[in-house]
Amino acid sequence: MNIRTLTTLAILIALSAVGAFIKVPSPTGTVALDSLPGYFAALYLSPGLGALVAALGHLLSAATAGFPLTLPLHLLVALEMAIFAAVFGVLGKRNVIVGIVVATLLNGVIAPLSFALMPKFGMAFFTAMVVPLLVASFVNILLAGLTARALRGKTER
């Protein structure tokens, strides 16, 4: 990894920390614009680096809310975020619209559905979280895709 990529990565992690404070109202208080830099990194740098930024972004957001789901469950969410960002990076490089739709559905529907399968949470958790997560996911991913596209166009000229 060269110094430029490392510096960009550090800036994106810092932006995730800032985004962690821009909350979307939700029952957990952890839904925020923290993953935008991770999704951006997945397209602009690599799916693996995007996964790292997205996972750290979620942990930063969860920390600002006091880890309401417990640290082990937030680590699970961070792993999901890493996977979703990497998927977005792979799909988005081929077709950004498909990447946006798939990643939004993964984070907005599949992530809360994984908690609905746990006895402690159930369908009530899914129902409470699906709309805030869909909205935040779409905003995070759309803005990341638009930003990556705009910057990629400028660097290719």
Image: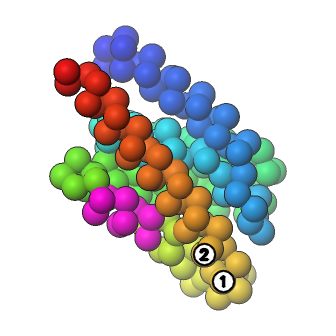
Mark 1: give few (<14), some (14-19) or many (20+) Cα within 10 Å.
some
The kind of residue on which mark 2 rests is Val
Along the horizontal axis of the image, is 90 left or right of 54? Answer: left
Q: Is residue 87 visible?
A: no
Query: Looking at the picture, how far across and down is residue 120, in whole percent?
Result: 72, 81
For the magenta stretch, what is the residue range? 97-105
Q: Is residue 10 visible?
A: yes
- State the residue at coordinates (65%, 88%): 123
Quarter of the image with the C terminus in it = top left
Q: Nearer the viewer, residue 41 or 73?
A: 41
- State the residue at coordinates (52%, 23%): 11
Residue on which disc 1 sits: 127
Query: Looking at the picture, how far across and down is residue 119, in whole percent?
Result: 67, 86
Label at residue 130: 2
Label at residue 17: none
Quick check: 34 above or below 107? above
The kind of residue on which mark 1 rests is Thr
Identify the main secondary structure in magenta. Answer: helix
